[in-house]
Image (cartoon, coloured by chain):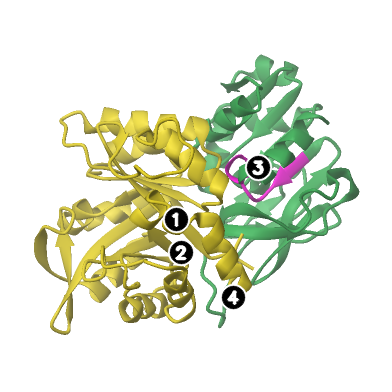
Chain colours: A yellow, B green
Amino acid sequence: MLAKRIIPCLDVKEGRTVKGINFVDLKDAGDPVELGAAYSREGADELVFLDITATHEKRKTLAALARNVASQVNIPFTIGGGIGAIQDVDVCLSSGADKVSINSAAVRNPRLVEQLAMQFGSQCIVVAIDAKQIGDQWVVHLNGGRIPTEVELFSWAKEVSDRGAGEILFTSMNHDGTKNGFALNATGRLSRELPIPIIASGGAGSAEHFYEVFTIANADAGLAASIFHYDEIPIRVLKQYLKDHSIPIR
Amino acid sequence: MKVAIIDYKSGNVQSVKFALQRMGVEAELTADHDYIMRADKVIFPGVGEASTTMKVLAERGLDKLIKRLHQPVLGICLGMQLLCRHSEENNTKCLDIFPMEVKRFNAGDSPLKVPHMGWNIIYNLGDALGQKMEKEYMYFVHSYYVEMSEYTIGTCDYIHPFSAIIQKDNFMATQFHPEKSGAVGQLLLDKFLSQ
């Protein structure tokens, strides 16, 4: 049986992780490669690195990050953050990344999803969607949640899936940072309506929250950042909890 | 020990090289026929689409070369599928080292998703592999699978049982990515390298 995945997400700026100060036994918790390798040893199933460096040399930065991680980490990882062109994806994958995640660029140019899926295969194209519930509408936002769009979450998710996205990484902006649990209704609806895996993100604050998102919302993976970085829920402990509650976990 | 990783510009062959490096083995990414023929071990990785990849292999004469290899060969993922007779992916004639069909997963009425992507358990391992990997999780990413056969020496269940590992003469192949399967994946690579 396919295991549910636990995915720590690391924000990287100028080659350094932005969060992660409390992490266990590291010589350099600011080093994304060392932190990633530590998560892998702890039992993380996959890693996501979001490069938030503002630079004109984005492509070089992404390639260096991918290469450094790939040389040290023996589990799959995704690189994202400002990926806008086919060449960006090419350098990430050829430098050793398993998947890339695209976000704003896909909304601006939906055909990009198709082109990437054709050229590199759906399995390595993750479309990240940041959305905020306003009234009874889930509104897709761009640029790390700063710019609202006219696009609605469920129709957009369906569209990128039809265009060949391999996975959807859905972040609820309403839940992100609250530690009150994932957006179960919206995540559940995405899982039901789409034929591709859904990674739930935003709101994880306890092991129970992962249990809920895997059972009630049927997510394929749960992603979190600060609870892992600050060692509030060690991955080993989280996975044991989920195993004890009969969730298929590696 | 000379290890050649067949390079045909497929996605992510770099990971295999890195995985071996972490085990202290320097491997060469190469399409050079002489180098591949003389290597002690050959790894045939692969991520991509079957018909395009077969075309690229043929252009470089690698299709004929692979069939002639006499040393231990490890096919990974698409590499495994291409070692079989035929793939349903764009109706592609493959290398026919293993006489099996590569078929597309059909989830039918089940809620299971295709591709089969993530960590799944391998079991019923053949004696040659030992027991250390029995019922351990490996990392899979694929929409097509190799049917069960007498050459299956490791099984995985998704929608139905399929071949996770196959072996025939000097050829072994895995549907999962040992280079991405953490410490357990490394055991498989170890096994292959120590053959």
At label 4, which amino acid type do we have? His
Residue visible at 58% across and 56% down in the picture: B91
The residue that disc 1 covers is A7
Please say if B124 is above or below B107: above
The residue that disc 2 covers is A221
Q: Do labels 3 and 1 share a chain?
A: no
Q: How far apart are marks 4 and 3 (CA)?
A: 25 Å
The residue that disc 4 covers is A245
Q: Along the polypeptide, which appears first: circle 2 or circle 4? A: 2
Q: How far apart are marks 2 and 4 (CA)?
A: 16 Å
Q: Do labels 4 and 3 share a chain?
A: no
Q: Mark 1 lies on which chain?
A: A
Q: Is residue A92 visible?
A: yes
At label 2, which amino acid type do we have? Ala
Q: Along the polypeptide, which appears first: circle 1 or circle 2? A: 1
Horizontal side of B151 relative to A164 (left or right) equals right
Q: Distance between the residues labelled 2 and 3?
A: 21 Å
Badge 4 marks a residue whose secondary structure is loop
User: Mark 4 near mark 3, Cβ–Cβ under 8 Å?
Assistant: no
Q: Distance between the residues labelled 3 and 1?
A: 18 Å
Q: Which of B153 and A66 is in front in this view?
A: A66
Q: Give the range drawn in magenta.
A: B172-181
Q: In front: mark 4 or mark 1?
A: 4
The residue that disc 3 covers is B183
